[in-house]
Image (cartoon, rainbow, N blue to C red):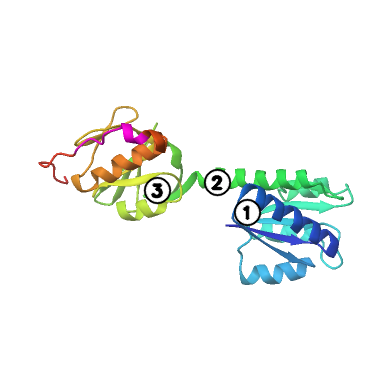
Amino acid sequence: MLEIAVIDDEPLHREILVKYITEWRTRTRRDLHVETFPSCEAFYFAWCGNEKWDVLFLDIMMDGENGVSLARKLRQAGKQIHIIFTTGIADYMQEGYEVDALHYLLKPLKKEKVWACLEKCLERNEDNRKTVVLSAPEGLVRVDAAVILYAEATGHGCELTCVDSVLQVRPGIQELAQLLSGYGDFLLCHRSYLVNVRRIAQVGRLDLVMEGGATVPVSRRLHTRVSQRFLQAFIPQEERRAFTLPASSHMETER
């Protein structure tokens, strides 16, 4: 769900933006919710009660507090909300850069430019979702989830094997699976192992071969689920019937 706020003291401009955003939602089938506010003060009051918004379409020149002042307050509070300034005066570009505005739209607004800003917001959100912050013995570490191959449970957390590094992290294997669930296609294949399905090169009867050649055990109980997820990740649905899932060994136990 993308939460969007339109802040403008002119009702007509609020209506136009809501119309354009709604059309984009229909066109792209994105899940979003939009609310309007007639002033910075009204928005900030709502924000203090629920910091839920992802995107602001923010008019600069308004009665009372102006848009740049509100943007500075949000940035000083460390908020990473996407800010898109809307104004009829092209004299505030520098202020926009100072508060890391995503874009600067001149009135009268053009539908295609509003849509382009929304697309850019989605791109930035996707980029942010690729990076996960995990606790580690030395503090906090930031990891690109896409380069994770697999994780193995250890006595004090997990050993995280990535494409070009190995990291020790504090979350246990179950907690790590929960933390990574929103960052890609991660799956428990064994009581002590978590794999990135997108990095599996081969599914065998007893083991998974990861990119780079490392092998990871797969339990009999989870074998079918792992195999199905592997097919779903790489084979179109209409072609999956041609593939036979490898059978797990009845002699195999979880190690």
Count of marks overlaid on the render: 3
Q: Position of residue 136 (x, y in %)?
A: 38, 49
Q: Between marks 1 and 2, how big is the CA–CA gap?
A: 10 Å
Q: Residues within 10 Å of mark 3 (few under 14, many from 20)?
A: few
On whether residue 129 falls in the magenta region, the answer is no
Q: Residues within 10 Å of mark 2 (few under 14, many from 20)?
A: few
Asked whether the residues under the numbered discs 1 and 2 touch, taking CB atoms below 8 Å apart as contact, a structural biologist would say yes
| Residue type at numbered disc 1 | Gln
**What segment carries the magenta color?**
240-247
Q: Position of residue 126 (x, y in %)?
A: 55, 45
- What residue sits right under mark 1 in the picture? 80
**Residue at point 76%, 56% (across, down):** 19
Camera-side residue of 148 and 94: 148
**Residue at point 71%, 52% (across, down):** 23
Asked if residue 169 lies left or right of residue 33, the reply is left
SS at badge 2 = helix
Asked whether the residues under the numbered discs 3 and 2 touch, taking CB atoms below 8 Å apart as contact, a structural biologist would say no
- What residue sits right under mark 3 in the picture? 138
Relative to 152, does residue 34 appear above or below in the rendering?
below
Camera-side residue of 88 and 203: 203
On whether residue 246 falls in the magenta region, the answer is yes
Quarter occupied by the N terminus = bottom right
Q: Earlier in the sequence, mark 1 or mark 3?
A: 1
SS at badge 3 = loop
SS at badge 1 = loop
Q: Position of residue 32 (x, y in %)?
A: 62, 57
Q: Between marks 1 and 3, how big is the CA–CA gap?
A: 26 Å
